[in-house]
C-alpha cells in the first residue's frame, strides 16, 4: 500500500498531533527500536517519555551549559586546535558522544580511545533508524552489526554503570545517603521509575543506547548541516562572523534556520489505528500509512515566504510558527532532546539574552566556539556527501582554523 503523503506545513503540523496515528518510521528495524520511547504508543510512551524528561530541568541545563559542556568541548577541540583543523564528521560525533554519554549515565574513563569506541558502537546502531531509507546495501549484515553493537554496549558500558547506580539508590533508600548524592541522568531516572521486575532488562539496555544515538548521532548530523549553511552565509557576508560570535540571540536564529532546512528526520511516518479524517480532507483507513514530509513542509512558501528553500536567518515568521519549523516533530512524539540540542528560543526583545536566562543548546555552543576559532572550509579538500541514504549525511567535511578569521569572544552570561 502506498503511503498517503502530506507536504504542506499546516496539514503536517495538524497531522503530527492526531493521537490515533502510531509511529511507523522505524518499522524496517526489528531489533533495536521497537520498544524504545520513540516507537511506543499511548500510556507506555507517555510514562517512559516523562521519565526521561524528568532529567531535563532548567537547573540541569544551566549546570550543563555552564560547567559540564565547556570542559567537554575544550577536551574534544584540543586535538583539532593543535592540528589547525580536522574533519567535522569526526569532530561532531566525538564531541556529542562525549556529552550525551554523560547525560545518559555511562561511567567512563573519558580517554579519546574510549570515546572513539562508543562512537563506533553508536555508528553501528545508527543503521537502525535509517534502515527504511537505505538505497541498496546488505540488510542482514547491518542487522548483525546492530546485534553485536548492542551486546558490546551492554557488557562494557551499561552493566557497570547500572551496578554503581543501583548501589547508590539502595543507600538512599536505606537512609545512608541523600537524594543529592544520586546522579541526575537517564539511567538513574529509569531505574527509579521502573523498579526491578517492571521493565525488561533488554529494553532498559536499548533505551540507554537509543538516548545516546538520538542525542549524538542525529544531532551531529544537524551540527554539520548547520556549519555548512553558516559558512556558506559567511562566504557572502564575511563581516557577520564577529556578530555571530558575540550576539548569541543572532546566532540562535542561524542555528534554527539551518535546523528548519535540514530536519534530522525528513519524513514522519505514521500508521492509522482507526479510520481517520486527515487535515487535507483525505480519509485514511485503519492500517494505512501517512507520510508527513517535514523537509517539504518546512519549505512551504505560504508560511516561510517565496525564498522558503533558501537559508535566510533574518526571515520574519508568524508568531505561531517556530524558527525551526517542524524539525522537532509535534504532538506526543515531539523530540524529547529538543532543548538539549537547540536550547530555548530567546525572547524577540533580547531580554533573555541580556539577563542570561536562555539555554542555547549544544549546537549553538559548538558553532560559536568553532566560529570564534576561525573555522573555514579546507580549500584543498572539499566535503563529500554520503549517498547511501535519502537523508543528507556528510561522508567527510574537512575544515581548517584560519587565524585571520578568529574572533575574540565577548563573555556570555548564563
Image: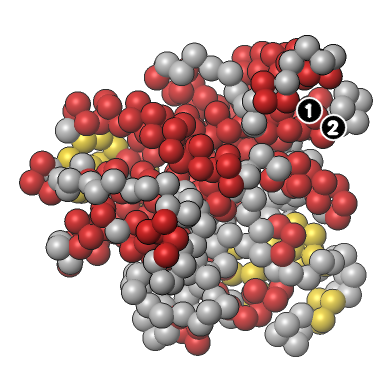
Front position in the image: 343 or 205: 343
Q: Residue at x 54, y 76 (%)?
A: 321
x and y percent of residue 124 in the render? 55, 32
Left or right: residue 312 compared with residue 265: left
Mark 2: secondary structure:
loop
Mark 1: secondary structure:
helix
Label 2: few (<14), some or many (≥20) within 10 Å?
some
Label 1: few (<14), some or many (≥20) within 10 Å?
some
Front position in the image: 241 or 135: 241
Front position in the image: 84 or 341: 341
Left or right: residue 366 compared with residue 300: left
- Res. 191 mark: 1
Q: Are marks 2 and 1 in contact (CB under 8 Å)?
A: yes
Q: Residue at x 73, y 21 (%)?
A: 178
Q: Residue at x 49, y 62 (%)?
A: 345
Left or right: residue 98 compared with residue 271: left
Residue 116 is at least partly visible in this image: yes
The image quadrant of residue 335 is: bottom right
Question: Circle 2 sits on which residue?
Answer: 194
Amino acid at each position: 500500500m502506498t503511503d498517503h503523503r502530506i507536504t504542506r506545513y499546516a496539514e503536517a503540523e495538524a497531522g503530527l498531533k492526531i493521537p490515533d496515528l502510531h509511529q511507523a518510521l522505524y518499522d524496517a528495524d526489528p531489533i533495536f527500536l521497537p520498544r524504545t520511547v520513540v516507537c511506543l504508543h499511548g500510556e507506555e510512551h507517555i510514562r517512559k517519555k516523562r521519565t526521561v524528561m524528568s532529567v531535563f530541568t532548567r537547573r540541569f541545563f544551566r549546570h550543563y551549559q555552564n560547567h559540564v559542556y565547556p570542559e567537554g568541548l575544550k577536551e574534544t577541540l584540543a586535538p583539532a586546535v593543535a592540528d589547525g583543523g580536522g574533519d567535522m564528521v569526526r569532530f561532531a560525533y566525538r564531541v556529542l558522544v562525549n556529552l550525551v554519554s554523560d547525560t545518559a549515565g555511562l561511567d567512563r574513563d573519558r580517554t579519546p580511545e574510549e570515546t572513539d569506541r562508543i562512537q563506533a558502537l553508536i555508528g553501528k546502531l545508527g543503521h537502525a533508524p535509517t534502515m527504511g531509507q537505505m538505497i541498496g546495501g546488505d540488510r542482514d549484515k547491518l542487522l548483525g552489526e546492530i546485534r553485536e553493537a548492542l551486546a558490546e554496549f551492554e557488557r562494557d558500558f551499561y552493566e557497570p554503570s547500572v551496578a554503581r547506580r543501583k548501589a547508590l539508590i539502595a543507600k538512599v533508600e536505606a537512609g545512608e545517603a541523600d537524594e543529592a548524592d544520586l546522579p541526575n541522568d537517564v539511567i538513574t531516572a529509569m531505574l527509579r521509575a521502573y523498579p526491578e521486575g517492571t521493565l525488561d532488562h533488554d529494553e532498559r539496555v536499548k533505551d540507554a543506547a537509543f538516548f545516546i544515538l538520538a542525542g549524538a548521532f542525529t544531532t551531529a548530523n544537524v551540527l554539520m548541516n548547520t556549519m555548512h549553511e553558516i559558512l556558506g552565509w559567511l562566504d557572502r557576508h564575511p563581516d557577520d562572523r564577529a556578530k555571530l560570535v558575540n550576539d548569541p540571540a543572532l546566532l540562535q536564529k542561524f542555528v534554527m534556520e539551518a535546523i528548519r532546512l535540514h530536519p534530522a528526520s525528513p519524513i514522519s511516518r505514521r500508521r492509522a489505528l482507526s479510520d481517520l479524517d486527515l487535515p487535507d480532507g483525505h480519509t485514511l483507513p485503519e492500517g494505512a500509512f501517512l507520510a508527513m514530509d517535514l523537509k517539504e513542509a518546512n519549505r512551504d512558501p505560504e508560511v516561510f515566504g517565496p525564498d522558503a528553500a533558501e537559508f535566510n536567518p533574518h526571515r520574519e515568521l508568524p508568531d505561531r510558527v517556530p524558527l525551526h519549523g517542524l524539525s522537532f516533530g509535534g504532538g506526543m512524539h515531539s523530540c524529547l532532546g529538543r532543548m538539549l540540542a537547540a536550547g530555548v528560543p530567546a525572547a524577540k526583545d533580547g531580554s533573555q539574552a541580556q539577563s542570561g536566562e536562555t539555554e542555547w543548546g549544544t549546537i549553538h555552543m559548538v558553532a560559536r566556539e568553532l566560529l570564534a576559532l576561525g573555522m573555514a572550509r579546507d580549500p584543498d579538500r572539499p566535503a563529500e556527501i554520503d549517498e547511501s541514504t535519502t537523508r543528507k549525511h556528510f561522508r567527510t567535511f574537512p575544515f581548517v582554523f584560519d587565524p585571520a578569521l578568529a574572533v575574540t569572544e565577548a563573555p556570555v552570561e548564563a
